[in-house]
């Protein structure tokens, strides 16, 4: 006997109703409450993280550009481009 796992009612008790929607005011209060729990980075941390990301992106751009130039040269040599 197969169990229906793809239908919308699979795994739900038959008498269960949909939960009520949250009001916009309650949603806003919940968002503000969650944002108060966030540990925001200091200016020094933010500058460090930004620098690390920029250096990583520049390294990846250099690698991809180098590979692109290498493959372009190889294709031109194989197929005899001008």
Image (cartoon, helix red, strand yellow):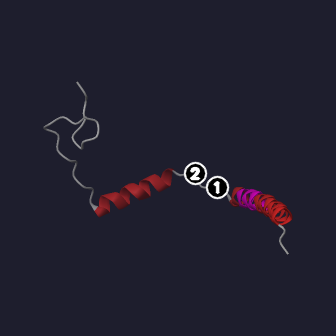
Q: Nearer the viewer, residue 30 or 12?
A: 12
Question: Label 1, on which residue?
Answer: 41
In the orientation shown, which residue stands out farthest toward the top? 1
Identify the secondary structure beneath mark 1: loop
Quarter assignment of residue 17 = top left
Q: CA distance from mark 1 to mark 2?
A: 7 Å
Quadrant of residue 44 in the image?
Answer: bottom right
Q: Is residue 23 rendered magenta in the image? A: no
* Rendered image quadrant of residue 47: bottom right
Q: Residue at x 80, y 63 (%)?
A: 75
On the rendered structure, is 21 left or right of 35? left
Q: Nearer the viewer, residue 54 or 35?
A: 54
The residue indicated by pointer 2 is 39
Q: Is residue 81 above or below residue 51?
A: below
Q: Position of residue 53 (x, y in %)?
A: 72, 58
Residue 29 in percent (x, y) is at 36, 58
Query: Helix or strand or loop: what does disc 2 sit on?
Result: loop
């Amino acid at each position: 006997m197969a169990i229906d796992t793809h239908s919308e009612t699979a795994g739900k008790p038959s008498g269960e109703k949909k939960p009520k929607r949250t009001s916009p005011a309650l949603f806003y209060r919940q968002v503000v409450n969650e944002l108060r729990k966030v540990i925001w980075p200091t200016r020094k941390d933010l500058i460090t993280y930004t620098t690390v990301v920029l250096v990583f992106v520049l390294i990846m751009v250099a690698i991809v550009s180098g590979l692109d130039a290498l493959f372009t040269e190889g294709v031109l040599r194989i197929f005899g481009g001008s």
